[in-house]
Amino acid sequence: MAEIQKQMQELGKNARMAAYLIANASTEKKNTALKNAAEALRINKQKILSANEKDMAEAEKNGISGAFLDRLKLNDKRVEAMAKGLEEIANLPDPVGREIERWQRPNGLDIARVSVPLGVIGIIYESRPNVTADAGALCLKSGNAAILRGGSESFHSSNAIMDCLQEGLKKSDLPEQAIQLVPTQDREAVGEMLKMAEYIDVIIPRGGKGLIKRVIEESRIPLLQHLDGNCHTYVHEAADPKKAISVVENAKMRRPGICGATESLLIDEKVAGKILPEIAELLISEKCELRGDEKACAIDSRIKPASSEDWGTEYLAAILAIKIVSGLDEAIDFTNTHSSHHTEAIITEDKKAAERFLKEIDSAIVMHNTSTQFADGGEFGMGAEIGIATGKLHARGPVGLEQLNTFKYVVRGNGQIRPS
Amino acid sequence: MAEIQKQMQELGKNARMAAYLIANASTEKKNTALKNAAEALRINKQKILSANEKDMAEAEKNGISGAFLDRLKLNDKRVEAMAKGLEEIANLPDPVGREIERWQRPNGLDIARVSVPLGVIGIIYESRPNVTADAGALCLKSGNAAILRGGSESFHSSNAIMDCLQEGLKKSDLPEQAIQLVPTQDREAVGEMLKMAEYIDVIIPRGGKGLIKRVIEESRIPLLQHLDGNCHTYVHEAADPKKAISVVENAKMRRPGICGATESLLIDEKVAGKILPEIAELLISEKCELRGDEKACAIDSRIKPASSEDWGTEYLAAILAIKIVSGLDEAIDFTNTHSSHHTEAIITEDKKAAERFLKEIDSAIVMHNTSTQFADGGEFGMGAEIGIATGKLHARGPVGLEQLNTFKYVVRGNGQIRPS
């Protein structure tokens, strides 16, 4: 067996064993481990920053720059933010062991559906060292063991952070193997990880499309995946123009780079002449590029012609595609055809139209009179999240602590046997 | 593009379009379609039976016999059972549109989690024509479009049944494409189906291990899968001997061929000398083969020595593996190591021991003082089921109408924008 395969198998076995212990650990122990890990991050701040300097130097040597480098960089403030993040997760309710449903059968059997951890979660992410702390902590609090594989550029930083997480576990008398980092930068390790169905229950990929496509292609393990966030906002004929303008501005421009940012704006032709110029004025003043269909371009000459590709693009930038539609039917049909089923919103004062949109749009999150930028676990009141799921199985939308649990049926009897 | 690929893409496109209509169809329309289909099955009984005779003749010509042939065979009674099955599904509650949770945020946003259909479900099954009716009906009632691929030996029977289902849809003014059968017997069609992630949301494989392994290996689409049912029953030292004997007999022998049948019996060494001989006596009188570890063989000479393979085998037959354990710790550890995480039971009058077993066993269904043969959607009160899921994501245990739904978040606002 190749060396990497051996290492990965070892990691998997350790995680599986730790998973049984962590699944049954008390809330208090898990919280203490998180608080101890936060303390360790603060105490070892210099070590973490030195490790990060090593990563940064190597990355710069390899010609990496820009946003990538910014995400890799740690400083005093970012280490403190990680420590605070762990403490916040400690303060969230424990998702394990909730009785979700309970009922009795005529034969006296008592059946309960109870939340339990998923088991071992594999998380594959890009070179963002803070994800090591976040992801590890969310898995721990939800009673799961974690195998983390960060981008190779963040290897030293992630290792230094992992040491603190494991110190926290050890101090609370929990198995260190409950959170492990893949011990090699070799890309082959990811391939091995995606085959280890015996040891890993779920894989969560976090990062760019290239990474996620590779994982979908190769994985033999079920995924909780985040694909595209090609979100739509539709301004209906009965929209309040003021609301429409401020919500569209927020949905696009608050943070154009997040997955919940609106990428396509649909406007009803009956109000486009009135509302579109104002929206265009505001967005252009904020340096947003506008690309529209023929009708949109005819309304405002500053709008550039959109190509058919624009309707399917997640820009993650200050660019907005604009389409004039004939009404609710076309808006629903166009959205269901082009969206990535993440988050879509309608702006209208017509409740009937709103309810039809909310019902018929096939997306994880559907909204009425508010900004798609609210598509976020924190904003939903779920506490920290590990991402937004765009698949349909298990979790849809924000993946927080509850979504890192599954359930089991607990059946209590007094000797019942099943008649033939 | 190859002919089969073209045909499958066409099927997929039709299913996707039908899915939007069926997702929003009223409960009444769906129920009427099911009742109309039941009527069509009765009216076209002779056609169905002739088609089945054709399948049977071909199968016999190809040397197929035994249980396989029995599952393929239709007769008056079986057609009537299919029709009744459709009517029963019509009488079950509609799972679509339930408000699962609803809460308000401090900023006034109102968030609801509402059940919605999965979309398009692909079901791949062996040559059991009745599954065509069952699976199609469960998908329809749960608001999903279905693409069905039955074993090629049942091709003519399944087509005749499909005609009746589509007649039911048509008569209720629902799109016929809501339930479709793969129109070719070519095995290549399955390969195509497993790649159509654009058109199929979930694949459910039903059948033997060979089929399911192929599907896991090839599928690019998320699965709801049923793997093994290697179920355990553990007789604890504080077991009531009478309950232990009758529950073990039922768990093994009621129907040895179902996935919830107990395959391994664990007995505490403190009571094995007393309880095992009685269990052995009863099971042997019913022609059950017993295979045990050394200690079990020493207690009753009619027990044959088990090999290490026996602990991991789903016999689906009148064979039982028996292991003597030192207590609860070993029982939990052994079960978690060897089980397929389907259903496991403890027999004991000691509530504390029972609760520890129920908590620490990592299976979809855990039971106290009852028979693992109760692992069934009908027995759980869930109505008809399409199978038992042994994965951890989305559905665990019986997959009924509710489990064929996912959910979406519905967010209602009055102009809220997200602060930066």
Image: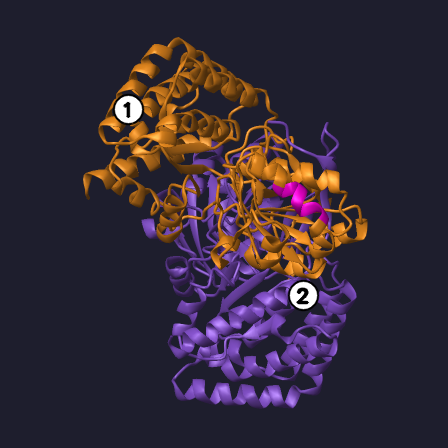
Chain colours: A orange, B purple
Chain identifier of the residue bearing label 1 in the image:
A
B248 and B64: which is toward the camera: B64
Q: Residue A177, can we see it?
A: no
**Horizontal and vertical percent for residue A211?**
37, 44
Dot 2 amino acid type: Leu
| Callout 2: SS | helix
A323 and B325: which is toward the camera: A323
Q: Is residue A275 magenta?
A: yes
- The structure residue drawn at horizontal position 50% and vertical position 59%, both measured from the top left corner, is A308
On the rendered image, what quadrant is the C terminus of chain A found in? bottom right
Instruction: Classify B404 as above or below A66.
Output: below
Q: Are marks 2 and 1 on the same chain?
A: no
- The structure residue drawn at horizontal position 42% and vertical position 73%, both measured from the top left corner, is B5
Q: Residues within 10 Å of mark 1 (few under 14, many from 20)?
A: many
The residue that label 1 is drawn on is: A55
Query: Which span is picked out in magenta?
Result: A274-280
Cα distance between the residues tagged 2 and 1 = 53 Å
Overall secondary structure of the magenta section:
helix
The residue that label 2 is drawn on is: B21
- The structure residue drawn at horizontal position 59% and vertical position 38%, both measured from the top left corner, is A283
Q: Residue B49, can we see it?
A: yes
Q: Is residue B241 left or right of residue B62?
A: right
| Res A55 quadrant in image | top left
| Callout 1: SS | helix
On the rendered image, what quadrant is the N terminus of chain A found in? top left
How many numbered badges does the structure rendering display?
A: 2
**Horizontal and vertical percent for residue B392?**
51, 46
Dot 1 amino acid type: Asp
**Horizontal and vertical percent for residue A299?**
64, 52
Label of residue B358 in the image: none
| Res B355 quadrant in image | top right
